[in-house]
Image (cartoon, rainbow, N blue to C red):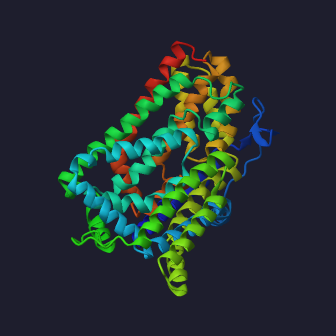
Amino acid sequence: MKKFNFNTLVMIFAVIVLVAMSTWLVPSGEYKRDIVNGRTLVIPNSFEFSQSKPQGIFDVLTSPYKGFVKAAEIIGFLFILGGAFSIIIKTGAITASIQHLAKTFAEKPHLQKFFIPVTMTIFSIAGSTFGMSEEVLLFIPLFIPLALSLGYDSFVGVSIPFLGAAAGFAASVFNPFTVGIAQSIAQLPLYSGMEYRIVIWVISTVSMIFFVNRYAKKVKNDPSISLMFEEDTKRKQSLHLTKTVVEHFSFSHKIILVSFLVGLGGLVYGILEYQWWLSEIAALFLGLGIFSGIIGKLSISELTDSFRDGAKDMVGVALIIASARAILVIATDGKVLDVLLYGCSGIISSVHPIVAAQMMFVVQGIINFFVHSGSGQAALTMPIMSPLADVIGISRQTAVLAFQFGEGWINPILPTSGFTMGVLGLAQIPWNKWFRWMLPMQIFFFILALLLLIPPVIFNWQ
């Protein structure tokens, strides 16, 4: 774990330095902004070059702290989440339930073939409807041991919730944080163009399930092919998944498991009905952790020690997220992000409409290297891309779709994404191994995005 944190932090810090160096080479500039309905939007055709603000050594050294401050909400959420899960794991309920579930699949192997398709479809629906993203972190500590117990590896355990939700997020049908905001900025009817988006969602979800399921079968037949083979062998031992004797599933374990499932139901209801965000979700799982500790008959010292140890395990993840956010701090303070957007928009306006739509997707992916908030990226890019779409002869609906693809399908592999690195940090998966494993899949979805942007241009999709 220490080696992973060190390597990852060095890699991210190197990117921070490179972005800082770019502020000495790229002229500064920015768009004017206006507040519309409580949202800060870029004003089209307002770009102006300004006095350069090159970022020096002191700026580089202060950027991780500033990144920590800007990412404080998700970092605080992770500390609470880590502590709460540590308490639940201490009760033994998670280990016992996973062992019994694995035993059930072993006795009824015909059921296991449905495990990955069904669970990934559920997460994809969540990503497509209410924009599940950070909430995925709740499921990483559950699906990794479950995947290991079924003969898979950590990649499969992470992919089920993470890539399942990403498949739906990129092909969103109702997601208010991407489609909803982007369409409102582009002055389109809310959730219009739903029919084509549903087709894309099916293609995206089926493709993602195919890749993960095919790999899962290979690694189950030969675990040694996994890049995480050595790490997973040690993890199985630490999680007691190598035991042949199944632990007793006590009445208290059942109560804890039921309360956890009820908590997940409450999570979905709170998000959909009351627009819960990280603070409310953290409160829910903190309460669930305390309740589990009481039902599991943990002493006060066991409960508090477990919470402290779980929160302590999140320190490395928090540093990764803060450092990743520091990249955006440097790019923003150095005023190079708007210059990048301005330059790319100029190139897009000079090419064929089909190529222009595809370039919009590429540009959104480049912007996503710095900005990892769906709503934030929409507020930055859509005021520029929407009128630009009118000029080059494509529909604004197509511009919104290019935004979806660039913000969704590229994000799971970016080392600058605090969320992606947080997921990998929580799963203890080195980014370089994840990159090697994900690259073929990422190339496929990149090409798929380019192809799916052609019909909207040809048929003038509205």
Q: Whole-percent x and y of residue 389?
A: 64, 22
Q: Whole-percent x and y of residue 54?
A: 68, 53
Residue 244, by quadrant, is bottom left
Q: Quadrant of the N terminus?
A: bottom left
Q: Can you say whether 407 is above or below 302 in the image? A: above
Q: Quadrant of the C terminus?
A: top right
Q: Out of 277 and 324, give the one closest to the viewer.
A: 277
Q: Is residue 409 visible?
A: no
Q: Can you say whether 43 is above or below 460 in the image? A: below
Q: Out of 137 and 4, give the one closest to the viewer.
A: 137
Quick check: 423 left or right of 386?
Answer: left
Q: Can you say whether 34 is above or below 162 in the image? A: above
Tell which residue pokes out farthest to the top in this image: 459
Quick check: 427 left or right of 182?
Answer: left
Image point 57% across, 69% down: which residue?
79
Tell which residue pokes out farthest to the front in this image: 251
Q: Out of 223 and 124, give the one closest to the viewer.
A: 124
Q: Whole-percent x and y of residue 431?
A: 41, 57
Number of callouts: 0
Image point 36% across, 44% down: which residue?
439
Q: Is residue 179 visible?
A: yes
Residue 59, by quadrant, is bottom right
Q: Whole-percent x and y of residue 320?
A: 53, 63
Image point 30% across, 63% down: which residue?
100
Quick check: 149 left or right of 254?
Answer: left
Q: Out of 348 and 142, give the one closest to the viewer.
A: 142
